[in-house]
Amino acid sequence: MQRTALVISAHSADFVWRAGGAIALHARRGVAVTVVCLSYGERGESAKLWRQPGMTLERVKADRRKEAENAAGKLGVADIQFYDLGDYPLHVTEEALCRLVDVYRAIHPSFVLTHSREDPYNHDHPVATDFAQHARIIAQAHGHKQGEKVLGAPPVFLFEPHQPEQCNWKPNVLLDITEVWDQKRAAIECMEGQEHLWEYYTRVALQRGAQAARNSDRKITYGEGYENVFPHVVSDLIP
Amino acid sequence: MQRTALVISAHSADFVWRAGGAIALHARRGVAVTVVCLSYGERGESAKLWRQPGMTLERVKADRRKEAENAAGKLGVADIQFYDLGDYPLHVTEEALCRLVDVYRAIHPSFVLTHSREDPYNHDHPVATDFAQHARIIAQAHGHKQGEKVLGAPPVFLFEPHQPEQCNWKPNVLLDITEVWDQKRAAIECMEGQEHLWEYYTRVALQRGAQAARNSDRKITYGEGYENVFPHVVSDLIP
Amino acid sequence: MQRTALVISAHSADFVWRAGGAIALHARRGVAVTVVCLSYGERGESAKLWRQPGMTLERVKADRRKEAENAAGKLGVADIQFYDLGDYPLHVTEEALCRLVDVYRAIHPSFVLTHSREDPYNHDHPVATDFAQHARIIAQAHGHKQGEKVLGAPPVFLFEPHQPEQCNWKPNVLLDITEVWDQKRAAIECMEGQEHLWEYYTRVALQRGAQAARNSDRKITYGEGYENVFPHVVSDLIP
Amino acid sequence: MQRTALVISAHSADFVWRAGGAIALHARRGVAVTVVCLSYGERGESAKLWRQPGMTLERVKADRRKEAENAAGKLGVADIQFYDLGDYPLHVTEEALCRLVDVYRAIHPSFVLTHSREDPYNHDHPVATDFAQHARIIAQAHGHKQGEKVLGAPPVFLFEPHQPEQCNWKPNVLLDITEVWDQKRAAIECMEGQEHLWEYYTRVALQRGAQAARNSDRKITYGEGYENVFPHVVSDLIP
Amino acid sequence: MQRTALVISAHSADFVWRAGGAIALHARRGVAVTVVCLSYGERGESAKLWRQPGMTLERVKADRRKEAENAAGKLGVADIQFYDLGDYPLHVTEEALCRLVDVYRAIHPSFVLTHSREDPYNHDHPVATDFAQHARIIAQAHGHKQGEKVLGAPPVFLFEPHQPEQCNWKPNVLLDITEVWDQKRAAIECMEGQEHLWEYYTRVALQRGAQAARNSDRKITYGEGYENVFPHVVSDLIP
Amino acid sequence: MQRTALVISAHSADFVWRAGGAIALHARRGVAVTVVCLSYGERGESAKLWRQPGMTLERVKADRRKEAENAAGKLGVADIQFYDLGDYPLHVTEEALCRLVDVYRAIHPSFVLTHSREDPYNHDHPVATDFAQHARIIAQAHGHKQGEKVLGAPPVFLFEPHQPEQCNWKPNVLLDITEVWDQKRAAIECMEGQEHLWEYYTRVALQRGAQAARNSDRKITYGEGYENVFPHVVSDLIP
């Protein structure tokens, strides 16, 4: 049976900056990755688009969707879904919650990626995290849509926020993404409206790569940091 | 080349209660495990022995050493070393530090096990942890005994203290020790002077096993919890 | 005047596992204990019931209610109320909040027991805690239902979650429940749908008992741990 | 251009106890300070008024408004707005959120003052903080009311809660308010319904003043403590 | 048998500012309180004395000793011991450690009072705390001076540092000292060399008293705050 | 009177990577900066030198000293002192402590820069921090070398460790070093033995610059992050 993974992104570009390496890496290894974008980031993360004359909310959303689809293509995403819940503020609803529960149960992901628990710079990110974890818990409930196969206990990894220390985010997993860096960079470059972040996130990848090399005895150039919510359950302690 | 592991135990019974499962498990898989006991726990953890008439410090130490050697045998320990630094308080010296550095460099362990960082019930445990980590860092220094092969970056796992919450110890790794539980129990029973702890640590193993099962989709009965000091460096996120 | 206590439980079994000893102990000493079950745990904590053929939501709720009433009987609960707010997710409403405020003011509890502040395994538990504390604060407001006697400042104790370290719950109160253990065990056995937890929570009681003995000079076999939200106000420091 | 500041107060007296010194000080230096009172604290913080015979909710609100306006006058507040959202519980709405966003954009404050992130004694205070920060973030979004000038990055300072340690509030900024103490005391005395707090908050000011003196080489008698949410961005490190 | 208590003070005035109320209160109730002053605070906390012409280290120590003895008299201290270990820095030795262990075993205190774990303003305070806890643990060891009755598990309360939030000290016990306030004030006034602190610590007592009143339903004017190191072991939860 | 600053560096290169910008910036503004290097980092941070044939400890120290002096020259350091206390482990002595106290009193620095409080990758860094703070406190004591002018309360800023999140270091001050970046880069390039870090720390400066820009309304390219140990004492809150 094919393995799957689930990425829950508050805005339509977050999965690229923060988890593009993990997505490309697992896709390359045959994991079918589903990305759920709760909003397009149309109000809060599209400054450059709004500077164009005559811009409308619908056009921003359409452009952002296009960019996200292009990036997903570069990364080998199997399925990308747009919930269009609005941003700044993100409006999570019980209906959307059930929809996400259905995704969990449809794909039974091996792992889940989402935002940090705190972010004083962004109100939508922690809302998305809470939403993602809430849906995961409901998907485990035998009494929710009785008869469906309930979800197991996939690990949840929180990807890196823009200003990690201020978000009290502390990486306890460093993923080597060297072999897929070119794909991540190509996906980053699909985010035409946020070109000012391209180099910023390239440097993030280099720093996490250097740290990963220093915390292991391997040669690693590019990395992504994650914070694991639940304990790792392991069969041995060999790194 | 044979893999190795290093366990640093403040008193001569700590490695049994806290890491006996990990030791037996890795020994069974061909890992040569070295255990360093910094003291015999002769003053602070031998109450039952001291209740015997005519007991002397030397006899307590000899009995404790015997118990530890017996337990090590049950667990398949490759090498057990006694530094005899005294307990309550544990006296760490620069000479002992260098001796431990030599052990790191002699075996180049794949991983290291030691105590929690804090313990309001025990002054020696955090001293042992600091000592273990200090030696690890010196073993990485090119200028220490120039010409020797320096240590890489083996992960350090902190094993479970007696009262975990009070020590601010939080397990982020749960190890399945079900297959070697009988060995751990046998080793525990070598600790004749601390029989009151046998059932206590059997329950600890059952609770960590239940938690491990609940944090995974596996059937696990007995477990050990560890807190990882450094980030895991990984090639993928599949559990 | 009779003393009272208030226990606020997200699901209808939580008060048993987590506070059964405290309830039985205080009941035995003449304290009238009111238990408020915000939901039956019908969706999320009734896996065994849902495995029965032809099960419906109403039947699960009825069975769970019966189990909870039976357990309450074993513990000597004075009053058990079911708010039936639904679980997974728990839907707290302003109407339910006012109802709980009324309970606070009707009984003026000497202390309050509820869930931990965090729980990554359970979305309803922290919601219940927030709800319980919120109602307590409103009950203290002179402008809420003017003329009623306002609530004083009863201490709030947070009972033990399923995986304490992962919930950042740290017990600073250990209650000796040895004398009522048989009652707690009998109440636990009323939870027929969750038999897999009987031994788990028996071991929890034994571990907390051992810790309580070690943190005092008393003989204690069974215990319950609590985290006090507010400072203890005391007249002396003698334990 | 005139500098401005924004103070967001859950109840109509909070800005006096907690930020009266900062308001008076900046007003004296030509900063136009806007105070937004989300509620009058009519239910939860008006015990003395409710003890008067025949008191009604409307009369309490009117009295509280009067007191707040008087205090604002003493402090030199430029603009005070009452959102009348109710208290215990405070009902924040999306409409109120947009109204506050408009204030941010109308005045472009140099800094923002609001409550601590946690407060186990008060449910409204953290709600107000979250609301204030949320509005600040939306005011920064280019897609919110396109065409308006977006907000920059004004620092947010959290003022002192009633029981600081219990709120996990830690002051990292101490403001010398000695020169405006008389004004703050006069404003405090406008709060006729809460006379029991006058001396309490005078002592708070003296303690923070003593601490400020001790953390600098200046002579300071009265102070206010703040916790800065975001890093200070500075051009030098000279105190 | 008479109850006892042990107070371990880094400098010879700390026990007065920080624990004078607890000492007087328990002395009044028949508890024999032993105070151990590790140093006189002769270098670091005697600024006023050093401003006198011709002052010498010996004279400062003599004056400080006198002040401490006078204060101890006001508080009803049963025994005050001066270890004269020097201050700034405090030099703790193994000999002094054994001497303190002997005190623990000689009096078997019902509780222990000492400093906070951290203090960025004072290097000696955390050293004293560690020393006090270390001695307590050794006093529990059966192998230390075999044959002596070992210490039980007296609770340790950390008294209030000068700047509580900066020391990450959080009071979880508030002691009503109203009935002995006059004695504490009289003892404070024995500290002639630190007159600038008299009012400061009077305000501390008033603030902690107000908080104690607010966290209970009692009338309390003066209080002292403590942080409990170990869990309270209790027989019931009634406040 | 000329302003001064004091930088305390565990190894002879730390002041360059971590505080080079602050040093150059303040030097340019007329502040006389004293750098104290506690060791040369000769054993632990000179891997490249040790790979040269025939290398000796003395030659490594001489080369490291030369590099540090060159870098200090690029940064405009007024005085650089080498205490030669050894590294891996750093041996701090009471004599060295007094020497550092003398420096504090000789220059009366406006601010102090040193390492983070924790660093699991480096045992010497936290030792240096503790040493620096300890000396600062002794320099404040009137009884230390009576008659000398005692130190005031200069702020202490902790500079960025190699892996910030793992050290629980959280920057609350971001310093704009754009105008002196060329000097810092030139100083970095003096560290010939650690060329692998040149780009790493250039990226650190760019990331902190981007964060500083985002936390202010200024254009900033390069930055340095600091964690302030003590509260800022300020006269106003305008950024």
Image (cartoon, coloured by chain):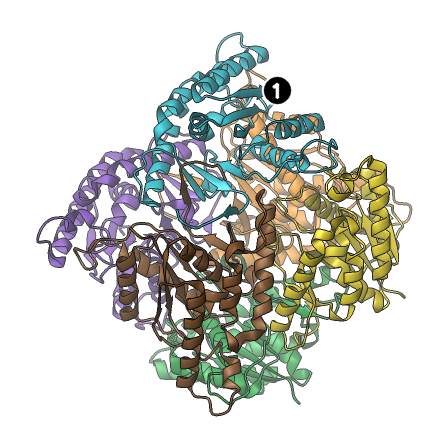
Chain colours: A orange, B purple, C cyan, D yellow, E brown, F green
**In the rendered image, the vertical position of residue E146 relative to residue A237, given as above or below:** below
Residue C99 visible in rendering? yes
Residue at the (68%, 36%) spot, across then down:
C138
Residue E154 place in picture, x, y as percent: 35, 51
Chain name for mark 1: C
Depicted E133 relative to depicted A187: above or below: below
Residue A94: x and y, percent? 69, 27
Callout 1 secondary element? loop
The residue at the far top in this view is C54
**Residue A36: quadrant of the picture:** top right
Classed neighbour count for the residue bearing mark 1: other residues with Cα under 10 Å, few (<14), some (14–19), many (≥20):
some
Residue at far left of view: B54
Relative horizontal placement of residue C58, taking residue E3 as reference (left or right): right
Instruction: Tell me which amino acid carries mark 1.
Output: Asp
Q: Is residue B223 left or right of residue D43?
A: left
Q: Is residue D190 left or right of residue B74?
A: right
Q: How many marks?
A: 1
Front residue of D23/C60: it is D23
Does residue F41 appear in the picture of this structure? Answer: no
Q: Is residue A176 above or below residue D73?
A: above
Residue lying farthest to the bottom in this orientation: E54
Question: Looking at the image, which is closer to me, A124 or C145?
Answer: C145
Mark 1, residue position: C84
Give the position of the N terminus of chain C as an image quadrant: top right
> x and y percent of residue A35 in the render?
64, 36
Q: Residue D138 in the image: x percent, y percent?
A: 78, 47
Towards the viewer: B47 or E100: E100
Relative to D158, say whether F151 is above or below: below
- Residue visible at 43% across and 78% down in the picture: F39
